[in-house]
Image: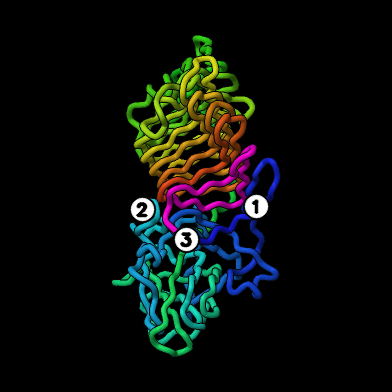
Amino acid sequence: MLMLFSTDSSSSSSHRLRHAPGGGTASPDRRRGWRSRWAAVGAAIAVSTGAGGIALVGASSSPASTFVAVTPERVLDTRASLGLDGPLTSPTGRNLQISGPVATVGGTRTVVPPGATAVVMNVTVVGPTADGFVSVRPAGTPGAPTTSNLNFAAGAIVPNAVTVALPTSGAQAGAIELTYDAFAVPGPTTDMLVDVTGYYVAAGAGGTGGAGATGPAGPEGPRGPAGEPAFATEGVVHVARNGTPDGSNGAFDSVQAAVASITDASITKPYVVKIGPGIFDGQVTMKSNVTLQGAGIRDTILRWTGGSRSPFSDGASATVDISRVTEVKLYDLTVQSNAGPSSAGFAVGIWISNANDVRLTRVEAGGANGSSESYGVFARGSAPQLTDVRANALGGSNTRGMMIEGGFATLRRVEATGSGASSTNRGLEAFGGTSVRAEDLTATASGNTGIAVVNVGS
């Protein structure tokens, strides 16, 4: 098990995952001058994504294209038979489908659309059995590879950024060829990882030409009908300031009422619930294709008093319940669960379960004073993406700033803190078959463990 965490020893145990620009990993004497950027925590514990140069592969040029960035998505991990079964064998090339529906860590989905002209990705070699190189090129390119994208020694973990053209037609449209060559020696093998970070699509028409001279004004037309109220924007639902509607703008008096009013949300018809400044009491149960947009972490606060049911069972004790839904986003708000006034057993800020494409951005989540357990964020069986998030747990018997049980979590600029418990405090706990990919993670626990990996494979 390889964990790219650095540990500071003090009365408060703090673990911080750091990154710096550079290439991948090899033997210890080659590690001066770079650090790997990504780490994965779980059954397959280490993942490196390098920040090396961009390699353009292929002899023919592509038409003018436009770059589209995406959230990094893993489409190949030969260690887990994701994308391809088993490691690559020298010197045989293997094709990997990139565009259209492909297998990812979070399930089958389209990361790169059909018709894309090129893909940008991080390619990582893991544990080659012999020195060699890897060549990445469009599928169907004739002849043996004549370029290399990664060069490495046996046993190394080496990443690099790669840009490669994609075939747009024929039987191999949207596929790339990966070749491990142990300098013409047949038989050695290597595992490989591919994380897509963006793609190119054919550029559209040129910009609109300048406007001509203004013509003479025509006669004034008839007055049109009265417009809709200001809050009646299509696909946008509003919650009144402090939950108090003024009787004229159509806003709801609670976040739950606003979410419950949405009955026709879909992937092609998403909704945004805009929440004004203030404190909003009560539980919120999210629906698919709905976004909660607050006025800011310090301005919009959702809170509730916890409950008696364990989050290992359901989200009944959570302030915000995100379960069995897809395409749910929370932005610019604080979610609190304080079981003190109710003496509830469990205080859970945000509960995520069996949900797809859940994103928390600029969010603070806290759980406090659960007589049994307190959690800031509890995620199970999901693949949430957390960016600029603080997760705090305080008081009670046990605290977990963030609990990840199963699934795959992506954390960027995340702080997780557990403190004040009578038994155990943990900033981040990865439990049971969990993978966590983190960039700039700080996990702190007073008197206990900042990061704990519990009941997972080696």
Q: Nearer the viewer, residue 271 or 458?
A: 458
Instruction: Tell me how far mark 3 sits from mark 1, CA to CA.
Output: 30 Å
Give, as a three-letter code, the residue at label 1: Thr
Instruction: Tell me how far mark 2 sits from mark 1, CA to CA.
Output: 37 Å
| Residue 183 seen in the current view | yes
Q: Position of residue 236 (x, y in %)?
A: 46, 28
Q: Residue furthest left?
A: 171
Residue 262: image quadrant is top left
The residue wearing badge 2 is 109
Give, as a three-letter code, the residue at label 3: Val
| Magenta region, main secondary structure | strand
| Residue 60 seen in the current view | no
Instruction: Tell me how far mark 3 sits from mark 2, CA to CA.
Output: 13 Å
Q: Position of residue 310 (x, y in %)?
A: 41, 29
Q: Pick whichever of labels 3 and 2 is earlier in the sequence.
A: 2
Q: Nearer the viewer, residue 162 or 188?
A: 188
In the rendered structure, the answer to whether residue 405 lies left or right of residue 10 reads left
Would residue 445 be counted in the magenta stretch? yes
Give, as a three-letter code, the residue at label 2: Arg
Q: Which residue is pictured at 48% across the width and 58% down the height? A: 45
Name the quadrant of the C terminus. Answer: bottom left
Q: Secondary structure at mark 2?
A: strand
Neighbor class of circle 2 (other Cα within 10 Å; few <14, some 14-19, many 20+) is some
Span of residues in magenta: 434-458
Q: Nearer the viewer, residue 392 or 385?
A: 392
Q: Nearer the viewer, residue 145 or 423?
A: 423
Q: Position of residue 308 (x, y in %)?
A: 41, 22
Q: Position of residue 55 (x, y in %)?
A: 55, 73
For marks 3 and 1, give the one nearer the viewer: 1
The residue wearing badge 1 is 7
The residue wearing badge 3 is 196
Q: Which residue is pictured at 43% across the width and 43% down the height? A: 405
